[in-house]
Amino acid sequence: MKKCLVLTVVLSLALTSWAFGGRVTHQGADPADHVMLVSASPDKLTQSHFRRIYWDGVKDSTDFVVPQGRALVITDVDFIFTLGNSQQNKTLSLRVNGRTVTIIPFQLDGIGYCVKSHMMNAGVIVGSGANISAITSGPGQLGNTFLRGYLVDTTVVQ
């Protein structure tokens, strides 16, 4: 039984790699399609837009917009929140073109601070031409916020 399971896994990985031309990551996407976005204005108190950081560390100088013919699947969100009230419950809302698409609850510690890493198990799909922003509830400061995911052709998500 173990040999059969191992063989199945190895064949699945080999076929996936072949289907993507040998260039595939753990998420089944071409490495060039992986996207990491960082908040463009971490000094703002509650809202931020995002800029892309490339594999070599270069950061775009303009806000990220999903390229035409592509969709972005957001898989992970990491953020820091400071200067809030002790033990307060808060939310981080991700917005696409100004509309909330997901809400991440979090609680501040005894000094009004929170570092959170959130896996978006179902993912959030953001369509072509859309821009993404994040906003938090109440007093405090949203620090660096990172979104991770990958681009897919829109024919894949239709």
Image: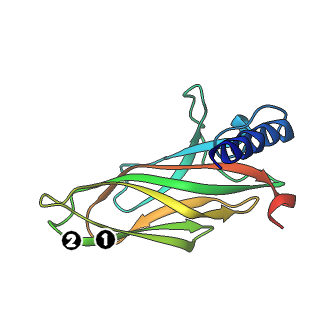
Please state the horizontal and vertical placement of residue 143, each as a whole percent of the image. 35, 50
The residue at the point 72 percent across, 44 percent down is 29
The location of residue 44, given as percent across then percent down, is: 37, 55
Residue located 69% across and 55% down the image: 72
Q: Is residue 57 above or below residue 153?
A: above
Q: How many marks?
A: 2
Residue 5 lies, with reference to residue 83, above or below; the image says above
Disc sitting over residue 129 in the figure: none
**Callout 2: helix, strand or loop?**
loop
Tag 2: residue type?
Gln
Q: Is residue 81 left or right of residue 130?
A: left
Q: CA distance from mark 2 to mark 1?
A: 6 Å
In the image, what residue occupies the spot 56% across and 34% down? 59
For the residue carrying disc 1, how many other residues have a C-alpha within 10 Å: few (<14), some (14-19), or many (20+)? Answer: many
Q: In the figure, residue 36 lies in which quadrant? A: top right
Question: Residue at label 2?
Answer: 88
Q: Position of residue 1 (x, y in %)?
A: 65, 50
Is 35 positioned to the left or the right of 29 in the image?
left
* Disc 2 and disc 1 in contact, CB within 8 angstroms: yes
Give the quarter of the figure containing the C terminus: bottom right
What amino acid does circle 1 point to? Lys
Specify the label residue 90 is tagged with: 1
In the rendered structure, the answer to whether residue 83 lies left or right of residue 40 reads left
Where is residue 112? Give x, y as percent: 18, 60
Q: Quadrant of residue 126?
A: bottom right
Q: Observer-nearest residue: 108 or 40?
A: 108
Q: Nearer the viewer, residue 27 or 42?
A: 27
Q: Secondary structure at mark 1?
A: strand
Q: Residues within 10 Å of mark 2 (few under 14, many from 20)?
A: some
Seen from the viewer's position, the closer of residues 141 and 113 is 113
Tell whether 158 sits left or right of 150: right
